């Protein structure tokens, strides 16, 4: 099959295109600008409800839609909901309608576990949980999911929705990269008393499940939760990061009440919550339905991440 990858120059898109090439897939990249003269790239410009996908979709059988407006720490938009919906909802549904009109067989849509909520209590998230998005980004991803499934029912085009937790790997940014940087620099980290459980997914495992989702019949019109299948606490994660980059883990105990006080004092409450709270994903249904298992363990994935990140 020939695959169109949107968001092909982003973190996930770059890795996915490399993975597709290794697996001998024919693929095309949809990009905003082709600054490198890539022969596989088709320029589509900004993504919204007016984007013309006709050239990019010619000869395509399956679309992997990765392009999105992602969570922004320092939001500058006057109305974030408007901007998130313009790209993530209007842009995605416009692509889906044009794809259906072209006879595209399937769209694989990368959503987020944040559609389920910001954290778990007592049990992991499951695919059939009632959505509980808590910010403009996750609300827009939920609305895009709903719209895509509606288009699937109306047109017969197949849709696969993947909800990953935090994605790590070479080139990833965010909290995990900042934590790795602190570990490499030898900082003493005050997280010794945290006893949480969080699910993650390595970029290698995510690319693997995306490729399986391109054609597997059991994935049709499903919401599928994906993860490494292992949960880790923040202290355990720091130890794995340290081991991966050949450092000694430097963790000391500080009561959670003190951490939250310091977080509030310095405007870092949400980061402390992510570092100390639970967010578990039950990906067993996905593994069973698609007869898939992670190609790398959490420890192997973190090792790769630690070795390769600058």
Image (cartoon, rainbow, N blue to C red):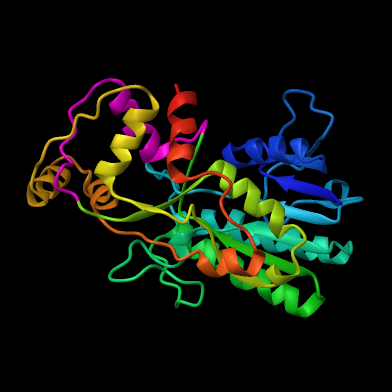
The quadrant in which the C terminus is found is top left
Residue 188 within the magenta-colored segment of the rendering? yes
Q: Would residue 258 appear left or right of 106 to someone viewing this image?
A: left
Q: Residue at x 44, y 45 (%)?
A: 298
Nearer to me, 114 or 287: 287
Nearer to me, 32 or 195: 195
| Highlighted range, magenta | 170-194
* Image quarter of residue 152: bottom right
Q: Would residue 63 appear left or right of 233 to someone viewing this image?
A: right
* Image quarter of residue 22: top right
Residue 116 within the magenta-colored segment of the rendering? no
Q: Residue at x 39, y 33 (%)?
A: 177
Q: Would residue 236 appear left or right of 218 to someone viewing this image?
A: left
Q: Would residue 153 appear left or right of 230 to someone viewing this image?
A: right
Nearer to me, 64 or 53: 64
* Horizontal and vertical percent position of residue 238: 29, 37
* Horizontal and vertical percent position of residue 187: 21, 25
Q: Residue at x 80, y 49 (%)?
A: 3
In the image, is residue 258 above or below residue 125?
Answer: above
């Amino acid at each position: 099959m020939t695959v169109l990858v949107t968001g092909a120059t982003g973190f996930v898109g770059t890795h996915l295109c490399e993975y597709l090439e290794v697996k001998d897939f024919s693929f095309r990249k949809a990009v905003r600008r082709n600054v490198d003269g890539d022969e596989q790239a088709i320029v589509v410009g900004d993504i919204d409800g007016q984007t013309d996908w006709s050239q990019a979709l010619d000869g395509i059988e399956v679309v992997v839609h990765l392009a999105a407006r992602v969570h922004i720490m320092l939001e500058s938009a006057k109305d974030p909901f408007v901007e998130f919906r313009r790209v993530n909802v209007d842009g995605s549904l416009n692509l889906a309608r044009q794809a259906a009109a072209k006879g595209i067989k399937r769209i694989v849509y990368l959503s987020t576990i944040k559609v389920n909520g910001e954290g778990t209590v007592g049990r992991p998230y499951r695919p059939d949980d009632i959505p509980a998005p808590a910010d403009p980004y996750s609300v827009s991803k939920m609305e895009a999911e709903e719209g895509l499934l509606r288009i699937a029912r109306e047109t017969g085009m197949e849709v696969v929705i993947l909800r990953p937790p935090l994605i790590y790997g070479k080139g990833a940014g965010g909290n995990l990269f900042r934590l790795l940087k602190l570990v490499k620099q030898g900082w003493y980290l005050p997280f010794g008393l945290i006893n949480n459980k969080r699910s993650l997914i390595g970029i290698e495992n995510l690319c693997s499940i995306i490729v399986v989702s391109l054609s597997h019949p059991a994935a049709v019109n499903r919401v599928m939760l994906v993860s490494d299948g292992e949960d880790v606490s923040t202290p355990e994660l720091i130890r794995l990061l340290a081991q991966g980059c050949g450092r000694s883990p430097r963790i000391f105990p500080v009561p959670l009440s003190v951490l939250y006080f310091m977080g509030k004092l310095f405007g870092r409450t949400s980061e402390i919550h992510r570092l100390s709270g639970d967010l578990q994903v039950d990906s067993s249904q996905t593994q069973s339905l698609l007869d898939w298992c992670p190609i790398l363990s959490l420890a192997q994935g973190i090792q790769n991440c630690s070795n390769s990140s600058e």
